[in-house]
Amino acid sequence: MAAVLLGTVLIAVRGSQLGRWVVDDAAITFAYARSIDEGLGPVQQAGSPPVEGYSNPAWLALLVLGRRLGLFDHRTYFGVPDQVLYPKGLGVLCALGTLMAVACVARQLVTNSWAVVLFCSAFLAGNMSFVAWMFSGLENPLYALLATLLAAVLTRALLNDRLTATGTAVVTGLVALAAALTRPDGAVLAAAYPMVVLLRVNRMTLRPSARAAGCALAAFVVPYAAFLVWRYAVFARLVPNTALAKAQDTPTWESFSGTGSLLSFAGWTAVLAGALVTGAALGRSGPARTALPGVLVPLVLALAAFGVLNPDWMRMFRFATPVWALASLTVGVALLDQVERGSLRARVVACVTVGTALLVSWGGQRERAASFQAHPTLPVCHVAYRYGAVFNEYAQRLKLTNASVLVPDLGGTLLTSNLAVRDLAGLTEPTIAEAYADKDMPALRRHVFETLRPTFIHTHGHWVTTPGLTVPRLVAAGYVRIYPEGTGGDWVRAAAVSDPRQLASTRSWAAREVPKLLSQYKTNPNETCGQLHPGLTLGAADRY
């Protein structure tokens, strides 16, 4: 337990180096938690229709619980908003739970289990991919915890010869269910128990093995089917709207190129060293050989799930968090097994090989980790001020009521905007999501210009070229630009502006204030912001 606590502190301290950063996508779930707790249902903001613009209902449930208990989205503690403290606190608790699951596995397989815990702690704390997404505000901590917990249940069952027990089967099915409700690709873990059973089946155990596999699948399928029925009844879809918007391709062999990128980030020397010590443990009779499949099978499944997902625009391999936890557990157990049971030469070779490989791996990751720490992926604070506060100001200065805004960055906007928010990325807009899935950009533009007709529009970079919201098209649709940003910028529907003098004044204000925000984001992207609430403005009282 001392090793678990020390390891948790080590991971938390590394996470604290990211300061108060929370990625903007996490705030989308924050907004849904606010709506649900206020009795509005699963909507992004008051007045919006129900759309499953999140893909992490289990994590959403924890946020709703925190808000109901007054721990989240309510106040600031010592200058730090609970919108930062609560999700990061959940990250620390999940890191603690993950290391406890590691300890549970290690205590059954090696004598010095504390060494495995410290190895995993150092491995994970040194991996910015793991640390960043554990403390991003997203569901990654819960996913990593559940994957490691599943490995702990499987290894215990293998060692105690209870793999085909009904209790084991049901527990693994329920853990896989929780993983599937944490992330859609978490459903792949439902295959872990049947695969481990298949590795151990023989003619004598065929019947109990088949019965146990059926129990595990039933424990997963029955409640998950009920969830799908509820999803269809509420949202008229069998998949979250986010999956449709991201236009996930049908997996092919080429899909697994993402796995190669992940292994390259880990370092091929580290991958090879880990494979060698794991192979040595599996090649020698003993507890490790018996139980390691319980860790390896979930690891392979998590790695395969990562590989088939479409490439993610966020840096540092956002979807790989459970892979790191399971990989560190596998290598840690295998290395300690070699140290405790191998010859003196084998011990020295194993420790030197793994230690050198990890040092090389960390050295290779250092520059990317430092870059991410200095400029983390899209902070919610920037989005809240750039799109929430700025467009609140536009509406006030132009004296517009019942206005709407179409933006591609949603989380911070939802938490702070007084306007009806429309999502250019399609995560909470079903028709836009369908257009992306069908690669039908003319349909997207017709929906934007003829159906939504937002009062304000913001575009930049990718969100100009992909949907084709170019300057000529926006002008032809009756929009005038308030503030230019590259080939895009901030636009308002001309017919909504009653006084040209107000438009000129608003343009002058934007030309003075918006560059300050953009410059501030480039020089200090992780600058703190206070509690995010509707009606946020750029006033000093709101910012500090």
Image (tube, grey):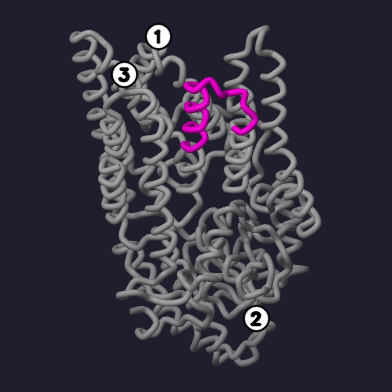
Marks 2/1: CA distance?
A: 70 Å
Between label 2 and label 3, give the one nearer the viewer.
3
Marks 2/3: CA distance?
A: 64 Å
Secondary structure that dominates the magenta span: helix
Q: Which residues are magenta?
A: 148-167
Tag of residue 337: 3
* Quarter occupied by residue 270: top left
Q: Which residue is mark 1?
A: 285
Q: Which residue is mark 2?
A: 403
* x and y, in percent, of residue 164 in the image: 62, 23
Magenta-colored stretch includes residue 161:
yes
* Quarter occupied by residue 349: top left
* x and y, in percent, of residue 434 in the image: 74, 51
Instruction: Classify 256 as above or below 43.
Output: above
- Contact flag, marks 3 and 1 (Cβ < 8 Å): no
State which tag comes first along the sequence, 3 or 1: 1
Tag of residue 344: none
Instruction: Classify 425 as above or below 407.
Output: above
The answer to whether 302 appears left or right of 511 in the picture is: right
* Circle 3 crowding by C-alpha within 10 Å: few under 14, some 14–19, many from 20: many
- Which amino acid type corresponds to the residue marked 2 in the rendered image? Ala
State which tag comes first along the sequence, 2 or 3: 3
Disc 3 is placed on an element classified as: helix
- Which amino acid type corresponds to the residue marked 1 in the rendered image? Ser
Magenta-colored stretch includes residue 157:
yes
Disc 2 is placed on an element classified as: loop
- Which amino acid type corresponds to the residue marked 3 in the rendered image? Asp
Q: Which residue is rendered at x = 69% and y = 19% of the image? A: 208
